[in-house]
Amino acid sequence: MGEGRPLVLIHGYFSNAFVNWIRYGHAEKLAAAGFRVIMPDLRAHGDSDKPHDPAAYPKDVLADDGFALIDHLGLTDYDLAGYSLGARTSVRMMVKGARPRRAVLSGMGLEGILHTQGRGGYFHNVLTNLGTFPRGTSEWMTEAFLKTTGGDPQALLLILNTFADTSAQELAAIETPILVVTGADDDDNGSGEELARAIKGARFQTIPGNHMNAVTKPELGQAILGFLSA
């Protein structure tokens, strides 16, 4: 969407580019400000392929897919942002050598970067026990979101195998200017403020909401735009 400076936006787990970036106006706002907004659907999500072969899900494959996209589009000077799993994927790309000019990590805390299996265990429980959760519980809400996005449970279960931990030393070595943005009531992946402290020079900002609804708030798009336009 739009023309201008390339900005790659990576959505969260169970979601897709439309739900995270288009539905609530973030992409339109960024495009209007002069960005060429590039929004892939991750492997096993949205309009991308959803293979059921475990061989299609090696460790760190989402980061590798990100590199493949950047190479395919010939991007050499670009910005990078992600929400939740998209933020973790952005971190993995930078750890493995991606050099965006700036990056925004949203909906992600330090624990979700250092120890991916904790959150992965939560989603494994949801995906292997669909239809059993009491109404109103966190698991029930996660399953409800899965239904709204039309996610493929088998493919999404396999994505859990691709999660890779990032060490504190690897985080400290990132040199890209970074903004960490989390909902004021979002601690699903640990502390966003602690994540910012773990990355040299990173800034931290809160917006209204929790992990599920902060992405729907206009403040998310405003925070991304404010940082990338500074």
Image (tube, grey):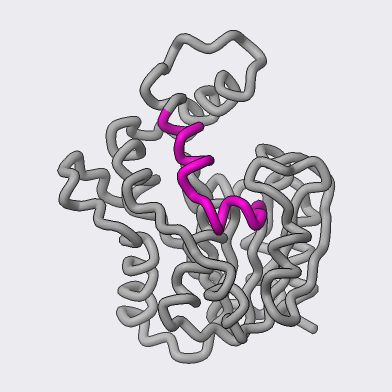
Residue at x 67%, y 69% (from the top left corner)? 30
Quadrant assignment, res 114: bottom right
Spot occupied by residue 130 in the image (x, y as percentages of width and height) = 42, 17
- Identify the residue at horizontal 38%, vertical 46% (top origin): 45
Instruction: Residue 69 in the image: state x and y as whole percent.
Output: 35, 73
Asked whether, in this view, residue 58 is left or right of residue 26, the answer is left
Q: Quadrant of the C terminus?
A: bottom right
Whether 67 is drawn above or below 186: the answer is below
Residue drawn at point x = 53 percent, y = 12 percent: 133
Residue 88 makes an appearance in the image: yes
Work out whether 37 lies above or below 118.
below
- Residue 7 in the image: state x and y as whole percent: 56, 75
Q: Which residues are magenta?
A: 107-124
Q: Is residue 4 visible?
A: no
Q: Is residue 190 placed above or below 173 in the rendered structure? A: above
Please tell me whether residue 184 is drawn above or below residue 174 in the rendered image.
Answer: above
Q: Position of residue 35 (x, y in %)?
A: 61, 77
**The magenta stretch spans residue 36:** no
How would you classify the magenta stretch by its main secondary structure?
Answer: helix
Q: Nearer the viewer, residue 4 or 65?
A: 65
Q: Is 102 on the left-hand or right-hand side of 210? A: left
Q: Is residue 118 magenta?
A: yes
Q: Say which quarter of the image contains residue 134.
A: top right
Residue at 78% x, 60% y: name it.
193
Question: 59 or 217: which is nearer to us?
Answer: 59
The mark total stands at 0
